[in-house]
Image (cartoon, rainbow, N blue to C red):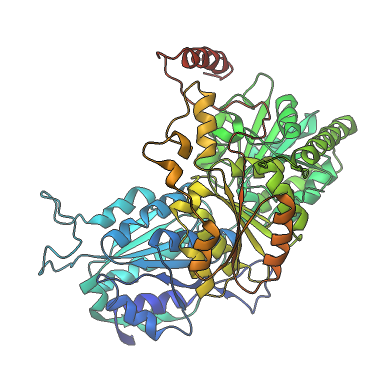
């Protein structure tokens, strides 16, 4: 057996650079690299070992420097999401705060089932210089380091304490990252002395390896059960989740729904599966959904949820779908998800199983009356959309009106990016997605600070498209440094910052539960909040981007047109109303105190008990 003598760090990077994937739409002869490179912020835990290895591999494994470890990980996650989990990036940091900065991003990737490879530096495996700078010491377990924080938020975790462990661990890491069921973050904690240690690795380890995504077909029994349900359905509804996009099944779903006349609602992760103009599209569903989709969900007799976990926002905290005489089917590649909500499971890959359903349903279609009713409800919702997003002369525009202005100036190829607060809800209800890849909202973890970093990752994945990031002032203040990275990397994004002077979304929730406004809007905070006069446009310019503040919606539209023509990233700031939001009549379970000195809280609790009665248990 021939061998190659490399350091463990060199071996890791050489191995990763030889991992390829064969995509469905690519010719057999053109597999693409799984890894687009690494985001790295170097410190004493990774600069000498991994830093040297990455320097030598720049042509095949590019390295990008970010400004915040959590931010660079968000960008890597957004890159993977934009690539339907088929391509991804590695993130490496130093051994202490650099590593723990990435734990939040790891949790985000875990919640959203998105692949990213974390390689944080670690303390010395040989323990000679213990304790080292930034080392966490456990008095009873010397093997514990800060990197153990990654264990609950990683799908696979390993600490590489010997160079030869890579021979086993790296293939398992790749399998996990590409596994449709177990997909999520992988952490390989890498002690700095082991990174620099050499070993004679077998040469076959570094041969080109082409991977394919395994497409699981449904078992006959489960398939026949669902076929019989559909053939007897009078009011069927499909709920499309992120799994539709990740499996590449969106075009197939569009044809399937139209042929069989089944309306399609979308979760946050699934929004964009169908363009908003598709005859079967009825918009988002649930707490942040359209009235059309929610009415159809309440009246449907058979609901087929495809590629979704059906979390509480989608189900209105188990009050929308779990009703008598309603049959719920979960088509999901993950059995863990397929059995949720006491659903009838249909386990398999969305693309493969939709093909099976199509082949066996023949010319069956839902009644025309139901299809026409869905179209009527959707048209009614479009009228509501036009009213909510129309230009107005109010002193402070609503979030909906800002989104309307953005949409009027955007192109069909543009991608909208968002994450936390009230904006994802408004986007889910109101954004007219143009198809797969046009809507990128992180709402599985709802992580403030994801927006700008995520926009950078989306742009790196789709350089030919304009990326429009919508973000509130609260999220921007939490994390904005990757705006500078976008300038440095020449990855232009357009940021629209809605300044409502605080955490407007949670302020509305706070008051909706009977509480007094407190510690959310700046005006209700301790200290001297009136002294906080933040010039966000000047801040953006200080980081090398273009920046301007606009006074109204008309000026916003003009600024957006300028930003789309600009050669570098632009931030546009506009003041908005913190109290205005789009109400669709949905309920979300937020526990309210049973006892309070405030009458408004006691009244809210009584209403809460009434709503809880709608839940199945």
**Residue 210 in sight:** no
Would residue 148 appear left or right of 438 to someone viewing this image?
left
**Residue 125 in sight:** yes
Above/below status of 481 relative to 35: above
Q: Residue at x 38, y 86 (%)?
A: 56
Q: Position of residue 29 (x, y in %)?
A: 64, 79
Q: Position of residue 431 (x, y in %)?
A: 71, 47
Q: Position of residue 315 (x, y in %)?
A: 60, 31
Q: Quadrant of the N terminus?
A: bottom left
Above/below status of 429 relative to 328: below
Above/below status of 513 relative to 170: above
Would residue 283 appear left or right of 130 to someone viewing this image?
right
Q: Position of residue 36 (x, y in %)?
A: 51, 73
Would residue 427 appear left or right of 508 to someone viewing this image?
right
Above/below status of 594 relative to 588: above
Camera-nearest residue between 386 and 216 = 386
Would residue 526 appear left or right of 320 to someone viewing this image?
left
Camera-nearest residue between 233 and 403 = 403
Number of numbered discs on residues:
0
Camera-nearest residue between 200 and 616 = 616
Q: Quadrant of residue 468?
A: bottom right
Q: Residue at x 54, y 37 (%)?
A: 505
Camera-nearest residue between 597 and 260 = 597
Q: Quadrant of residue 223?
A: top right
Q: Residue at x 18, y 67 (%)?
A: 125
């Amino acid at each position: 057996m021939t061998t190659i003598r490399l350091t463990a760090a060199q071996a890791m990077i050489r191995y990763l650079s030889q991992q390829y994937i064969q995509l469905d739409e690519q010719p057999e002869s053109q597999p693409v690299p799984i890894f687009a490179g690494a985001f790295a912020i170097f410190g004493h835990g990774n600069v000498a070992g991994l830093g040297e290895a990455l320097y030598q591999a720049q042509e095949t494994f590019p390295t990008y420097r970010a400004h915040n470890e959590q931010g660079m990980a968000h960008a890597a996650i957004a890159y993977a999401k934009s690539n339907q989990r088929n391509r991804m990036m590695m993130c490496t940091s130093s051994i202490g705060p650099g590593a723990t900065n990435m734990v939040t991003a790891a949790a985000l990737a875990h919640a959203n089932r998105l692949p990213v490879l974390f390689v944080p530096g670690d303390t010395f495996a040989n323990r000679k210089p213990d304790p080292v700078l930034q080392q966490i010491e456990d008095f009873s377990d010397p093997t514990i380091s800060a990197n153990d924080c990654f264990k609950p938020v990683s799908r696979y975790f390993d600490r590489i304490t010997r160079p030869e462990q890579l021979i086993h661990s790296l293939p398992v890491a790749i399998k996990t990252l590409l596994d449709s069921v177990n997909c999520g973050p992988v952490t390989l904690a890498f002690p700095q002395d082991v990174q620099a240690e050499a070993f004679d690795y077998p040469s076959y380890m570094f041969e080109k390896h082409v991977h394919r995504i395994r497409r699981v077909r449904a078992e006959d029994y489960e398939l026949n059960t669902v076929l019989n349900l559909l053939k007897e359905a009078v009011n069927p509804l499909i709920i499309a989740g992120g799994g539709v996009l990740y499996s590449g099944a969106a075009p197939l779903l569009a044809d399937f729904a139209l042929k069989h006349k089944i309306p399609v609602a979308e979760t946050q992760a699934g929004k964009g599966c169908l363009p908003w103009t598709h005859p079967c599209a009825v918009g988002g569903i649930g707490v942040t959904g359209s009235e059309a989709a929610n009415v159809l969900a309440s009246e449907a007799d058979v609901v087929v949820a495809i590629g979704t976990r059906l979390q509480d926002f989608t189900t209105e905290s188990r009050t929308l779908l779990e009703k008598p005489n309603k049959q719920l089917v979960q088509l999901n590649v993950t059995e863990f998800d397929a059995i949720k909500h006491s659903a009838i499971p249909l386990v398999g890959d969305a693309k493969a199983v939709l093909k099976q359903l199509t082949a066996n349903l023949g010319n069956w279609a839902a009644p025309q009356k139901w299809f026409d009713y869905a179209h009527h409800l959707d048209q009614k919702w479009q009228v509501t959309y036009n009213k909510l997003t129309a230009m107005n002369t109010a002193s402070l525009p609503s979030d909906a009106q800002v989104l309307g202005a953005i949409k009027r100036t955007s192109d069909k190829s543009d991608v909208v990016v968002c994450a936390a607060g009230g904006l994802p809800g408004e986007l889910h209800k109101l954004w007219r997605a143009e198809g797969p890849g046009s809507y990128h909202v992180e709402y599985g973890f709802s992580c403030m600070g994801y927006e700008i970093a995520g926009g950078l990752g989306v742009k790196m994945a789709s350089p030919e498209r304009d990326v429009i990031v919508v973000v509130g002032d609260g999220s921007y203040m939490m994390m904005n440094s990757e705006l500078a990275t976008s300038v440095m990397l020449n990855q232009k994004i357009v940021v629209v910052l809605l300044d409502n002077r605080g955490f407007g979304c949670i302020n509305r929730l706070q008051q909706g539960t009977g509480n007094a406004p407190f510690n959310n809007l700046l005006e209700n905070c301790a200290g001297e909040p009136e002294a906080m006069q933040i010039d966000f446009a000047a801040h953006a310019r200080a980081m090398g981007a273009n920046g301007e503040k606009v006074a109204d919606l008309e000026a916003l539209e003009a600024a957006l047109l300028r930003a789309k023509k600009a050669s570098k990233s632009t931030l546009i700031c506009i003041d908005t109303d913190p109290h205005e939001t789009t109400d669709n009549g949905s309920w979300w379970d937020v526990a309210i105190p049973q006892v309070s000195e405030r009458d408004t809280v006691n009244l809210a609790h009584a209403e809460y008990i009434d709503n809880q009665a709608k839940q199945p248990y």
